Image: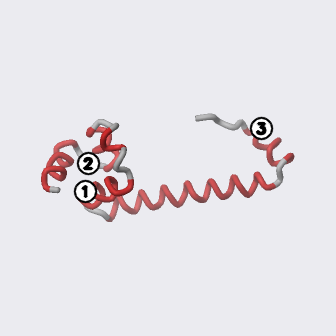
Amino acid sequence: MDVITFDRMQELIRVVPAWRQIGKDVDEAMYNSLMNRSVQLQTLTASERYELFIKKHPDILQKVALKHIASYLGIDIATLSRIRKSI
């Protein structure tokens, strides 16, 4: 991932005035995404979070270790194994 320095960001805003709005839009999208994830971790059951995960990211199941998926879902590997067996 590339990082834009503060000075480079200021230069982009000066040269391309629309860049300020682009930055705001990206920040807002990231904030909304983080808020949705936070709400899901607090309100959905482990099973519901897993089902949502496999609907949104079916390709990741084949590429990522289950321990990482369990961590992302906020559950331990044993719970993930039980959920996977019941589905």
Q: Cβ–Cβ below 8 Å for labels 1 and 3?
A: no
3D distance between C-alphas at marks 2 and 3 = 40 Å
Secondary structure of the residue carrying numbered label 3: helix
Mark 3 belongs to which amino acid? Arg
On the image, the x and y values in percent for residue 49 come to: 30, 57
Return the disc, 2 or 1, that comes first in the chain's sequence.
Answer: 1
Q: Which residue is mark 1?
A: 46
On the image, the x and y values in percent for residue 61 come to: 31, 44
Mark 2 belongs to which amino acid? Ile
Question: Which residue is painted at 25% across and 56% down in the image?
Answer: 46
Q: Cβ–Cβ below 8 Å for labels 2 and 1?
A: yes
Q: Which residue is mark 2?
A: 75
Return the disc, 1 or 3, that comes first in the chain's sequence.
Answer: 3
Task: Assess disc 3: are there few (<14), some (14-19) or many (≥20) residues with their C-alpha within 10 Å of its C-alpha.
Answer: few
Q: Furthest-right residue in view?
A: 15
- Residue 69, by quadrant, is top left
3D distance between C-alphas at marks 2 and 1 = 7 Å
Q: Front-most of 34 and 84? A: 84
Task: Assess disc 2: are there few (<14), some (14-19) or many (≥20) residues with their C-alpha within 10 Å of its C-alpha.
Answer: some
Question: Which residue is painted at 47% across and 60% down in the image?
Answer: 35
Q: Front-most of 81 and 75? A: 81
Q: Which residue is mark 3?
A: 8
Mark 1 belongs to which amino acid? Ala
Q: Front-most of 61 and 49? A: 61
Asked if residue 20 is positioned above or below residue 63 in the image, the reply reads below
Question: Which residue is painted at 63% across and 54% down in the image?
Answer: 26
Task: Assess disc 1: are there few (<14), some (14-19) or many (≥20) residues with their C-alpha within 10 Å of its C-alpha.
Answer: some
3D distance between C-alphas at marks 1 and 3 = 42 Å
Secondary structure of the residue carrying numbered label 2: loop
Return the disc, 2 or 3, that comes first in the chain's sequence.
Answer: 3
